[in-house]
């Protein structure tokens, strides 16, 4: 007698997470709705956790008065300038460390020693050196951006497949052209990934620096709201920072798509 | 152009890889280099191509490169070495961009190289969109674009499947039937060597020493003829006899670690 037939059981599913945009949207709407309900129904005190509507209303009032823009522009200027200077200097040293023995020999122990120091700990020193004004804040942000950029740049150069460099050498491609056409594009993925970290770092440091000593800026806005127990304004400032971080992430994604379209 | 290796020895740290290699690559010939794994075949090729300075010995060139040659000693790599961010045409153009060529001449060289390798319709494709065989064709097109005097091929087919290998071997045969480009062809595959080479240089296990250079006295175009088969089988036996013990010893050495 023939054996009974059994359908083969499929065992290959799972371990391949995808992404559903609607799930994120639904979750976000539910979270805000629940938060609003907690405020409206009095489940939590508005002093400790104001409702989303109260935060939006406080932000709107600040925007109409023009205060929000003053603070926002001050922070953005510091972040932009500090990030740019830290990034350019970090790229210069990182690429040099990736390419030249002397720069690597000096740079690696230097970076290893300075990279782990929380840069905000150096702000009092920078205030002593450069004063309480803009310079100390910019140097703090620049230093915070500089070291991760150095590491990203020289790791990126190290990650460029050596066979590509050898290929170019075998065809007599000049040194500068190898750097420009092979090393830089090859290192770009790691460098741009480093940008994600350094932009977040710049945002953290600008807020911390402004909380310590600034008249304008989102950090100053948040700390003054905290002192006055105006939690709706305080959280409004936090929302602004979250939106800034989000926009920076989108900008880096667009940059990645442009520079790394081949991946 | 002839390439002459004189007394080439090379060590990597404490490891001797090549020892006292004297070899002459004659103008217009395809010289296959075979030997057991780790015998220094690729090291020798790097030395012949000026990418590695030998610990001892020297490499001499004799004769003139042909007109239009932009890079006398030109490699075709085992792993293709294509820039993933450049298109097929861009990869071929890369090796021309630093030469003083008019844009029209550069484009003409690129197009000609793509046409010779059957890649005209893939000029805009990125390497990731191509099969292994097509990628190696790009590597060959890139080499042909500079009109080399000597092609240095480092196991160009070893990363490919059997069918693609067969197709590319046909391409190489056609290339060397059409034009007499001098070539050094490193391989571990005896059949490839017997099919493509004019002479086969057999190396001992590490440190690689030149054991013998075997002539293949059958014209490349006639090796598929039934009459040639008996002689090719005999040559295969002879070459295998030369490297069999060496290969066995090399494998035992690797296993002993």
Image (cartoon, coloured by chain):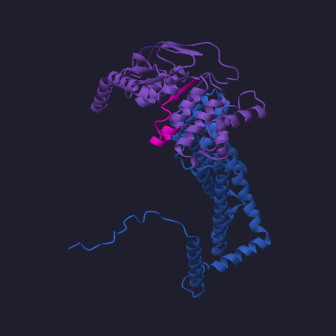
> Looking at this view, is B177 or B67 the one in front?
B177
Percent of width and height locating residue A50:
61, 78
Q: Colour of chain A?
A: blue
> Looking at this view, is A125 or A220 the one in front?
A220
Residue A258 in view here: yes
**Figure check: A45 above or below B169:** below
**Figure check: B22 above or below B223:** above
The residue lying at 67 percent from left, 61 percent from top is A247
The residue lying at 50 percent from left, 41 percent from top is B164
Magenta segment boundaries in residue numbering: B150-167
Q: Which residue lies furthest to the bottom in this view?
A: A41
**Figure check: B177 above or below A244:** above
Q: Colour of chain B?
A: purple
Q: Does the magenta stretch include residue B153?
A: yes
Percent of width and height locating residue A256:
64, 52
Residue B76 in view here: no
> Looking at this view, is B45 or A213 the one in front?
B45
- Looking at the image, residue B250 sits to the left or right of residue A2; the answer is right
Percent of width and height locating residue A94:
60, 39
**Figure check: B96 above or below A35:** above
Q: Quadrant of the N terminus of chain A?
A: bottom left
> Looking at this view, is A104 or B90 the one in front?
B90
> Residue B246, located in which quarter of the rendered image?
top left
- Looking at the image, residue A42 sits to the left or right of residue B207; the answer is right
Percent of width and height locating residue B77:
53, 33
């Amino acid at each position: 007698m023939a054996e009974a037939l059994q359908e083969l059981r499929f065992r290959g599913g799972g371990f391949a997470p995808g992404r559903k945009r609607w799930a994120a949207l639904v979750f976000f709407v539910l979270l805000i709705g629940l938060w609003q309900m907690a405020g409206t129904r009095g489940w939590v005190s508005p002093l400790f956790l104001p409702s989303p509507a109260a935060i939006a209303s406080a932000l709107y009032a600040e925007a109409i008065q023009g205060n929000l823009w003053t603070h926002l522009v001050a922070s953005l200027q510091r972040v932009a300038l500090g990030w740019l200077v830290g990034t350019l200097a970090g790229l210069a040293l990182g690429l040099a460390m990736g390419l030249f023995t002397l720069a690597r020999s000096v740079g690696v122990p230097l970076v290893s020693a300075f990279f782990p120091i929380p840069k905000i700990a150096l702000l009092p020193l920078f205030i002593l050196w450069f004063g309480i004004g803009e310079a100390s804040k910019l140097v703090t942000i620049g230093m915070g951006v500089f070291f991760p950029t150095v590491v990203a740049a020289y790791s990126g150069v190290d990650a460029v497949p050596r066979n590509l460099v050898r290929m170019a050498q075998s065809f007599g491609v000049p040194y500068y052209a190898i750097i420009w056409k092979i090393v830089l594009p090859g290192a770009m993925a790691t460098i741009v990934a480093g940008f994600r970290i350094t932009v977040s770092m710049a945002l953290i440091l600008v807020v911390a620096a402004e909380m310590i000593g600034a008249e304008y800026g989102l950090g100053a806005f948040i700390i003054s709201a905290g002192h006055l127990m105006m939690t709706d304004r305080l959280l409004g400032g936090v929302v602004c920072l979250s939106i800034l971080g989000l926009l920076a992430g989108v900008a880096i994604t667009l940059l990645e798509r442009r520079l790394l379209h081949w991946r | 152009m002839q390439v002459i290796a004189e007394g080439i020895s090379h060590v990597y740290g404490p490891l001797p890889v090549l020892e006292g290699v004297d070899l002459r690559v004659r103008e217009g010939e395809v010289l296959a280099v075979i030997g057991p794994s780790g015998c220094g075949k690729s090291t020798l090729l790097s030395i012949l191509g000026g990418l590695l300075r030998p610990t001892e010995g020297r490499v001499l060139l004799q004769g003139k490169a042909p007109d239009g040659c932009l890079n006398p000693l030109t490699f075709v790599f085992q792993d293709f070495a294509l820039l993933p961010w450049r298109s097929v045409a861009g990869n071929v153009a890369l090796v021309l961009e630093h030469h003083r060529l008019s844009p029209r001449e550069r484009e003409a060289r690129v197009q000609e190289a793509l046409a010779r390798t059957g890649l005209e319709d893939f000029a805009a494709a990125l390497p990731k969109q191509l099969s292994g065989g097509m990628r190696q064709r790009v590597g060959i097109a890139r080499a042909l674009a500079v009109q080399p005097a000597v092609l240095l091929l480092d196991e160009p087919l070893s990363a490919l499947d059997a069918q693609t290998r067969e197709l590319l071997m046909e391409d190489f045969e056609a290339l060397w039937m059409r034009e007499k480009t001098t070539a050094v062809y490193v391989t571990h595959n005896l059949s490839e060597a017997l099919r493509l080479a004019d002479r086969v240089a057999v190396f001992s296990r590490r440190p690689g020493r030149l054991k013998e250079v075997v002539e293949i006295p059958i014209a490349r175009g006639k090796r598929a003829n039934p009459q040639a088969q008996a002689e090719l089988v005999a040559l295969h036996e002879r070459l295998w006899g030369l490297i069999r013990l060496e290969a066995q010893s090399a494998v035992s050495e690797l296993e002993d670690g």
